[in-house]
Amino acid sequence: MANLVTNVETAVKDDPDATAIGFRGQEISYGAFWQRTGQFAAALDERGLGEDDRVAVYLPNLPQFVTTFHGTLRAGGVVVPMNPQYKSREISHLLDDSGAKVVVALADLVPFVEEVVDDTDVEHVVSVGGEHDAATPFDEFLAEDTLDVVPRDADDDACQPYTSGTTGQPKGVQLTHENLGSNASQAASLAPGGVNDEDKSFGALPLFHIYGMTVTMNATLFNGGAYYPLPEWDAQEATDLVAAEDITLFHGVPAMYNDLINQPNTDEFDFSSVRMCGVGGSGIPVEVLRKFEELFEPKIYEGYGLTETSPVTHFNRPDVGRRVGSIGTPLDGIDSRIVDGDFNALDPVEEGPVDEDDDALDDVTGELVIAGPNVMKGYYNLPDANAEAFTEADGKRWFHTGDIGYYDEDDYYYIVDRKKHMINTAGYNVYPREVEELLFEHPGVADAAVVGIPDDRRGETVKAFVVKAPESDVTEEELKQYCLDNLAEYKHPREVEFVQELPRTTTGKVQKYELVERDQS
């Protein structure tokens, strides 16, 4: 039986009384959690739903999300996670495209479902955290009996998250039971000695996002650990949770670590129970990593992944060693290459990170491509997009990540930037991340993002959006000169705009297209 949920069943059999989920003082045992997933699966079955039927989950990080996810798998269905920050316009495409038959939504979000439900295949709306005339309360939806696990094949769809849709409509990503199962196992191996039944995993990463789903929720529950979801990110609440529950595994995105180091009471934070901190979602500025490790005990280990790769492909594993600035080495069983525009593999540099005084970055960089059991089946009902996303070569099916990078002779990989973010100014390539890294080193900068804007003479030029550090009086001219003193002339920002905050996705990625649109409006 290849059904992903059998991994939870194994943990239940090992110790049904152990804590599976801890939520704001409440502890839910593996036995109780397994009972609830069975009741949810039976509820779907009673309504004629099961194999390959899509169930949309429109919730923040709550125990009901975890139950719905695994209950849907148990019934043979496919989970469609939806960002709880989305409104009716945004969920309309996801529901219509996926053909979801059930939506489990936070009660406050049910009105958004109600606005679009008539234009979709949705048959049942289930509410969490309150009642609504258009929905059935979660506990009432559950069946009295449980349903046995429905067998599934390794290549059957298990989950269909959607890409963020920064350009065009979001695409449904078909992740199979093998994709998610293999990557949860790989993710669990990243902690020293592997994730085990004594681990307590911090759960602020959104569960609708593949990073939170695989690396925190599934990697923990498949190995008998306890998962502690947090519905929304708050630095103080997060550190209180870490201290109160003796959290051992802390995964986050760069914005979370940046928030932590900029809190006024960092001397009160206790991270002594944490045995590993991981970071992904986007590259963490080296200065943020350095400041965090100066303030707190654990080191941060950077990794890399995408929704389409389930997600983790590379990591700086504590047992192997890390290189600051690198995304690490490929995980076991995953192949990666750096290729040029003709899909020729590029040679490695001797040792990274590249010193630009010695090496021309453009001569060693190319697109990162990935092959392995974690790589998605494809984009749902989008044959043209799939043809563009994959290349068959050397007996493998390679996924094009769209990220530009290089690697060294020790197989450590380095991401320079997104292909679409690269700025071409007067024929020179500028990688925004390099300029952002420098800005983060300035004591007057708390946050920064760099984009390319139209320029009549150069085609594009560099612009920086900067959030000042508390009580900083840094000026635009000061930052321009600072960059000019430390970078080639063509790389320094011609414009600096101070903002209160940067627009970010729920997973902490800066929405650069919004900055570009803001500049052009």
Image: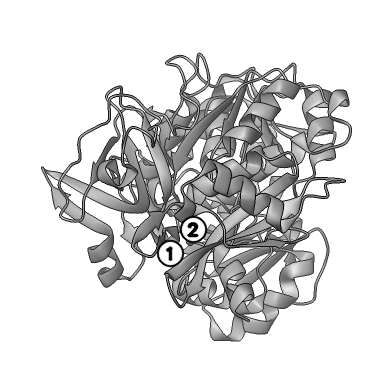
| Vertical order, 349 against 382 (above or below) | above
Left or right: residue 18 compared with residue 8? right
Left or right: residue 479 compared with residue 369? right
Residue at image coords 20%, 56%? 341
Which x, y percent locates residue 335?
Answer: 26, 36
Q: Nearer the viewer, residue 269 or 52?
A: 269
Residue at image coords 76%, 21%? 246
Q: Quadrant of the N terminus?
A: top left
* Residue 51 shows in the view: no
- Identify which amino acid the numbered label 2 is placed on: Pro
Dot 1 crowding, Cα within 10 Å, few <14, some 14–19, many 20+ = many
> What is the number of the mark on residue 411?
none
Which x, y percent locates residue 15?
Answer: 62, 20
> What is the number of the mark on residue 161?
2
Question: Would you name the residue on which mark 1 appears?
Answer: 172
Q: Quadrant of the C terminus?
A: bottom right
Q: Are marks 2 and 1 in contact (CB under 8 Å)?
A: yes
Residue at image coords 57%, 39%? 284
Q: Nearer the viewer, residue 269 or 61?
A: 269
